[in-house]
Image (cartoon, rainbow, N blue to C red):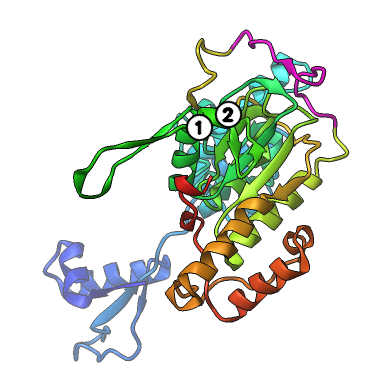
Amino acid sequence: MKKISLEELQRESRTDSYPEQYRYICGRMESGRIMPVKSSPLNGKKPALHTSYWLVEEKPDYGEETEELQFRTVPGIRTDYYLKHLDVYREERKWVRLLNRFFLEQRGAGGEGPAYVSLNERSFQIWGREKFLQREQGRKILAHCGIGMEELRVYQTTEPLAYYSGTRRVPQTVLILENKDTFYTMRRWLMGGFALSGEDGGKEESVDAASSPGKIFGREIGTVIYGAGKGILRSFEDFQFCVEPHINHPNNEILYFGDLDYEGIGIYERLAALFSMGKEETGNGKSGDNGEEMPEAVEEPAGCVGEEEAFPAAQAGECSCLHEIKPFIQAYEKMIEKTREYGRDFLPEMSENQNHSLSGLFFRYFSEETKAAMRELLEAGKYIPQEIVTITDY
């Protein structure tokens, strides 16, 4: 509560007569609008008054808000929280009424409910603010209303996948790469060649990939995908909607190659677990016989094969992939081989905040000798970036 002085109250009375001032102040106290600060001294007059008073805030009238919640709100919106916190409802009323209007319109339209749209699209449709659910107070409003995100029929969008396909033939081997430099280099290799500058500005030497078309470490690779570190975990939740059908073909082999440290291995294991959760579902990739060329999809832009792609997710749904993701064994073995050439002391130290909890799935694919070398390296606090492998190693 705020304080007000006796002098201020006397001025409010608009009279110089002390008896009139006294009656005015007593009237304010009787109406409950002010209370004397009992610790304040008296003014020394008769009848005496305290020299300081508390201003008692008037209780707001929430009659209109109460009626609105009880009689003009759709049953789907829970009102119990707001009826207990009417002051909060008065602050959030604008957003609640817009949500109420949305549900009223959907109920009037009939059917099973609105079509699924993206989070930001629904946010704008309801509140006129596309980031209201993502960054502003939309989620708090939903919680106060007892509304789950699923009731808005929205889907989350992920970061677009960047990939390069050298062929549409299926089945093929798809290689997911953790880091950008390795993706860029392998993409150039699969495109048919790579020019290496000689030392001291000497003559350029062309490394001809055509002699082993599409092969990296002896494995024929049809598509390389840039995983962007942990970003791949978000993007691959909508894998079947992010890529062209030939990449999601159920008979494809999917390999993963990343840094050899706890974080890089952890990314692989979480990605493998994500795909295994969809193994019982039915894939939406277009079927084709062994070695069959996948046809162009009607919606695809022309000339998309042989170019880097970045198509965002187009609709909602669970990942229905039938793929087992395996480590790219030959690439990891090359990392270990080159480590022996450099020496362990040359390798960088692993960051201390990495999560060391691994399921062990990653190591099951390697020989005992390779597993021992990997574990010895990790236990020594060292790691191998995948950039240790260069174009001249392929």
Q: Residue furthest right?
A: 280
Residue topped by disc 2:
213
199 sits left or right of 186 in the view: left
Q: Is residue 114 visible?
A: no
- What residue appears at the point 48 percent right and 27 percent down from the top-left corner? 192
* Magenta segment: 282-299
Q: Which residue is mark 1?
A: 209
Q: Is residue 315 above or below residue 82?
A: above
The percent coordinates of residue 195 (x first, y second) are: 36, 35
Q: Looking at the image, how many numbered discs can be counted on the residues? A: 2
Majority secondary structure in the magenta region: loop
Q: Secondary structure at mark 1?
A: helix
Asked if residue 164 lies in the magenta stretch, the reply is: no
* Residue type for callout 2: Pro
Q: Are marks 2 and 1 in contact (CB under 8 Å)?
A: yes
In front here: 214 or 223? 214
Q: Is residue 276 left or right of residue 32?
A: right
Q: Furthest residue to the left? A: 16
**Where residue 194 sits: x, y (%)?**
41, 35
